[in-house]
Every structure is written in structure tokens, then in C-alpha cells.
Amino acid sequence: MSNELKAVFEDISCKKKFNEPMRNYASFRIGGNADLLIFPEDTDDLRNILYICRDKKIPLFILGFGTNLLIKDGGIRGVVISLNKGFREIRITDDEMITAGAGAGLQTLVSFALKNGLSGMEFAVGIPGSVGGALIMNAGTRDGEMKDIVKSVKIMTDDGEVKVIKREDIGFSYRHSDFQSGSVVLEADVILRRGNSRDIKKKMKSLIADRKSKQPLSSYSAGSVFKNPSNDFAGRLIESAGLKGFSVGDAVVSEMHTNFIVNRGNATAGDVLKLIEIVKERVFTKIGISLEEEIKIVGEE
Ligand SMILES: Cc1cc2nc3c(=O)[nH]c(=O)nc-3n(C[C@H](O)[C@H](O)[C@H](O)COP(=O)(O)OP(=O)(O)OC[C@H]3O[C@@H](n4cnc5c(N)ncnc54)[C@H](O)[C@@H]3O)c2cc1C
């Protein structure tokens, strides 16, 4: 498909990569090639890309920083859009409000809030990924989630219309949002409150230390693989089912955090998918609870 796309996207001047290995854009370091990875720099570029995809019926996937993705070994057909080259601006737009572009890093936003003495983003320290990905996933920890600080989100619909959606209309829930499929998140307004920079920093330091002591941060992974069932922890259930350290190929249930699957180096998406099925089946058989994936599984076998 890459050759057909070369002709179709010839007139779009932003950066394009054809037949691009997606493993280079995913924290799991797993994934086949995308037919076209494209980097719009502004809303005009983005709208033109969306129009072409709609008119030519080309499938479309929006990539954040790839920290919550398992991209299958056959890669992604059609167009993958990254907002990483534009859409990165972070600015103060009101006394206690920050407007952040979807292509900015969540940690850049966290640091910006700290630098400006604004409190409320501490929960997000150490969560990798982009602002856009964090909004789609309603990223968070038990200390808070994106839904607690978002005032509104600007999106572009699949037919190029820019809309602002208020928090209450986004349908945020645990690691979930209800943005219309095909919409691209462009930026968000987040409401924080004046705080003391020293206290904010202290809280962040302690959260980072906690994360380092519990998560295999030097390994390739996509974070927690499963959602926590209500009133329990997926990691605890997986450990109870005797699966700590269990592996398929180079995909391993982490010894350090049993809700993480880590790629020891050469794991394929096929290995991870097999391991996910085994974990789900054993937890269900032994404990009677069905685990649901938190990571997004995308692409072709
Ligand atoms: C070591 C580690 C620790 C983690 N810890 C946490 C944690 O504590 N809490 C937590 O919630 N998560 C955690 N995660 C998971 C992950 O970091 C979050 O889900 C993160 O918010 C994903 O952001 P991303 O930019 O990488 O999104 P991606 O993984 O690239 O994409 C995730 C989804 O968002 C969509 N998307 C991304 N950007 C846009 C956009 N602009 N418009 C429309 N759709 C878009 C994608 O299509 C995809 O469906 C962790 C991951 C790792 C590797």
C-alpha cells in the first residue's frame, strides 16, 4: 500500500515516512511497519490529511508516544498520524489555567506546572506519553486522573471540524474516555490551583521514588497491561495465579510488577498476545475474575 500512498500524499509537504517500523515509536519496542507515518505541523496539514483519508477510504490511526500500545507484527495499514512535530505548545491562558498541545509530553506539562507554581498535576509525574494519549486514556494513578484537572478539550472531527468539548461531555471513566472514534485531540485546558513549588516538588519526588521501587522502568513495556478490577489489583491476581516470571518467548510477566509484561529484547506481538491469553485464562480458571486489557492492541496479525 505504501506505493499507492506515495502518490496520494504527494502534495502534502509535511514530514512523511513510508513503510516505517513502528517498533521505533512504541515503548514495548514491538510492532511491524506502518504504510505511512505522517507528521502534520498545524491544523491545515491535519485537515488535509483527514480529508484525503476520508475521500479515499484510507484507514487512519492516531499515535501518541506509543507508551500504551501493543502494535501487532503485521504493522498498521493506511496512515498513522503523529502530532509530535506540531501541536506541542504549552502556555498559561488564565491565572490558574494551562493550555497544552496534544503532541506535548505529559512530563513537559507536569514540569511546566511546577515551574509556574501550579498544583494539581503531581499525580501525573512519571506517567510517560503525550498529553493527547493521557486524555484519551484518562491516565492517572490512585492520586488522581486527567479528568480531575481537564476543563475542556479541543478536537478535530474526522471531517475536519474543530470543536471544543467540555469535561462533562467527554465521558471520562477509569482509563477511558468517550471521544468520538476518528477524532483527533488537538489540545486541552487544564485547571490547576496556586501552590507552593517546594511542596509540589516534594510530592513529585516521593511519587517518583515510589514508582522506581515498584515498576520495571528500565525494561521495554507498555505499563500496566490489565485494568484493575473493582476493589482489587490485576497484579495481585496474576501473582496469585502463579504467573510471576512466566514467559512466552521474550515476553515475560515482570517479577517486579506482575501487571507489567516486559519485552526482554526480541519479543514479538504474537508472544505478548499469547502471554495475555494465558494470563487471562489462568486468572479466570483459578480466581474466577475476567481481566480486561488496559493497553490498546492495534494493527494486523
Ligand atoms: C513504564 C510505564 C508506566 C506507566 N504508568 C502509567 C500510570 O501510572 N498511569 C496510567 O494511566 N498509564 C500509565 N502508563 C501507560 C501510558 O503511559 C498512558 O496510557 C499514556 O497516557 C499513553 O499516552 P501515549 O501518548 O503514549 O499514547 P499512545 O500509547 O500512543 O496511544 C494511546 C491511545 O490514545 C490514542 N491517541 C493518542 N494521542 C491521540 C490524539 N492526539 N488524538 C486522538 N487519539 C490519540 C491512540 O490512538 C491510542 O488509542 C505507563 C506506561 C509505561 C510504559
Image (cartoon, rainbow, N blue to C red):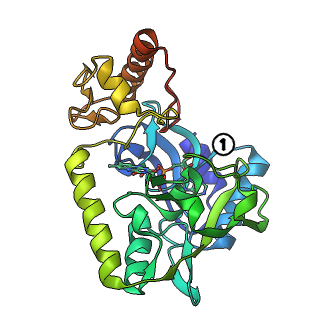
Classify residue 239 as left or right of residue 114.
Answer: left
Q: Nearer the viewer, residue 120 or 218?
A: 120
Of the 4 image quadrants, the one containing the N terminus is top right
Query: Residue 37 location in percent, x, y?
Result: 51, 53
Q: Which residue is mark 1?
A: 59
Element under label 1? Answer: loop
Query: Residue 255 location in percent, x, y?
Result: 21, 32
Classify residue 192 as left or right of residue 169.
Answer: left
Q: Is residue 121 above or below residue 217?
A: below
Res. 286 in view = yes
Residue 262 lies in what quarter of the image? Answer: top left
Res. 11 in view = no
Query: Residue 154 location in percent, x, y?
Result: 69, 68
Q: Residue furthest front?
A: 231
Image point (32%, 78%), residue name: 199
Q: Is residue 27 above or below residue 293?
A: below
Q: Name the amino acid, label 1.
A: Pro
Classify residue 109 as left or right of residue 175.
Answer: left
Q: Residues within 10 Å of mark 1 (few under 14, many from 20)?
A: few
Q: How many marks?
A: 1
Q: Residue furthest bottom?
A: 95
Image point (47%, 54%), residue name: 140
Is the distance from the Cβ of mark 1 to the nearest ligand 1 atom less than 8 Å? Answer: no
Image point (64%, 50%), residue name: 177
Residue 99 lies in what quarter of the image? Answer: bottom right
Q: Nearer the viewer, residue 113 or 266?
A: 113
Query: Residue 284 location in percent, x, y?
Result: 46, 14
